[in-house]
Each structure stands twice: as structure tokens, then as C-alpha cells.
Amino acid sequence: MENITFNMSELHNHGTAFFDYLSLRKHFFVDTLNWDIPHNDSYEMDQYDNPLAYYSLVLKDGKVVGGSRVMPTTSSWGEYTYMLKDAVNGKLADIPDGVLDKEIKTPKVWECTRLVISDEVTNHADRSECLSLIVDGLVKLTKQGGGSELMSLSPISLMRALRQLGYKANRIGEPYYNPGDGRKYAVLSMPAIPSTKMKSVVRPTAKILPIHQDLELRQTA
């Protein structure tokens, strides 16, 4: 397995990888978890898939088998910012506005969303490698963009999986139960430090543009 990272300006360098990732998201979040989110018959795509987002995907034999999205918490695109801030401000009906005690807005903290691993990655060792590759890609993008911390709204079980891989993940928000998919979620946070237990194979990462106050570069739910 190998990791690739890119933003929307670089989609053409990776064939259909971005759309394969959107298809993987549709299969998991819509078809499996029955989330009521924007999609068609092939793809799941929302308002946070915009030019401020970056992506960390994992390929196995050339096929996308996992991935996630990341953006700094200073992001703003139209009426939206980033997922957790919009939830705190009551813009996202399916996420409680108390999921965080307060808004976080700093170029040092980046949010990860839409973390997914394919059902075709079946054994524990391969799934662990895939997760490590995804997260190491997110870490690299975050550090190159000037960030030092990652956070995400994720199933609580992800915290244990991350710790087993050597990431220093912690819960920073109160957990809540989602009756739609029967899972418990909470906001997790970790330093942007690569895994200490897995060796990643990573292609060159996306070029990070400068962040400024008005137009910011922008993991999980």
C-alpha cells in the first residue's frame, strides 16, 4: 500500500483517485451507515469538498482503499467554515451543537473528516497499515501547512486504534450517541506527529499554499 496527497488543483495528477474516494465514501456513509448527506448513485460529496480541502488517500495495487480529508480550522468558504465549527454554530442538524465547548479557530489546528477504509481491506494488519498511511499523510499535510494538531469527530473506538499505532490521540469533547447508525462519537485530538509503529510508503505530498486571514486553506465524520 502507498499514500498519495493532493488538493483540487492537483486532481489531474492522480487519475480517478479523487472520485474513487468519493465512491468509497458513498458506499460507507450512505449505503452502510444510512447517513442523510448529499450524494448521487455513485458519489458522496459535501460543502467541505472545496478548493481549501486536502486529501490523504491510500492505494493498493493502484486502487483507492482508504482516505480522509483535512483542512485548517481557519477555513471559510461561502457561508461555511469547517465541519465542527459549523456544528457548534447550529448549521449541521445531525451533529449536536455542544459537541465542542467552544469554537476552535487557529492555523495550528486542522480538522480531519470523512475517514474511510474499504471493506476489501479485511485483515487487521492491513487495516492498521491503511489507517497509519492515511493518518501519516494527514500529519504531513498539516505540518506543511503550519499546523501542529489534528482533530476530528470520530467513533470513540478510533481513539484506541490510533493509540495502538503510536499516535497520542485523546478525547476533547463529550461523547454522544447517534441513533441513526447506532455509534458513539466524540471529538478526538492528537499532535501532528507521524506513527511510531508503522513504516509508511508515501509519494510526494501536495504543495501547500500560504494561509492568510481572508482566504484560508482548508477528519471521522
Image (cartoon, helix red, strand yellow):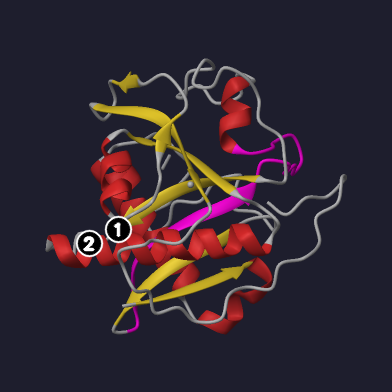
Of callouts 1 and 2, the N-terminal one? 1
Badge 1 local density, few (<14 within 10 Å), some, or many (20+)?
Answer: many
Image coordinates for residue 166, horizontal then vertical, percent: 33, 54
- Which residue, given by chain and number where applicable, does mark 1 sit on? 117
Residue 167 is left or right of residue 50, and the answer is left
Q: CA distance from mark 1 to mark 2?
A: 7 Å
From this view, report whether residue 91 is shown above or below residue 74: above
Numbered circle sitting on residue 90: none
From this view, report whether residue 23 is shown above or below residue 60: above
Magenta part of the protein: which range? 62-82
Numbered circle sitting on residue 127: 2
In the rendered structure, are the residues bearing label 1 and label 2 in contact, judged by CB atoms less than 8 Å apart?
yes
Q: Quadrant of residue 188?
A: top left
Question: What amino acid is labelled 1 in the image?
Answer: Ile
65 inside magenta stretch: yes
Q: Regarding mark 1 in the picture, which secondary structure is present there?
A: strand
| Residue for point 38% across, 74% down | 200
From this view, report whether residue 183 is shown above or below residue 218: above
Q: Regarding mark 2 in the picture, which secondary structure is present there?
A: helix
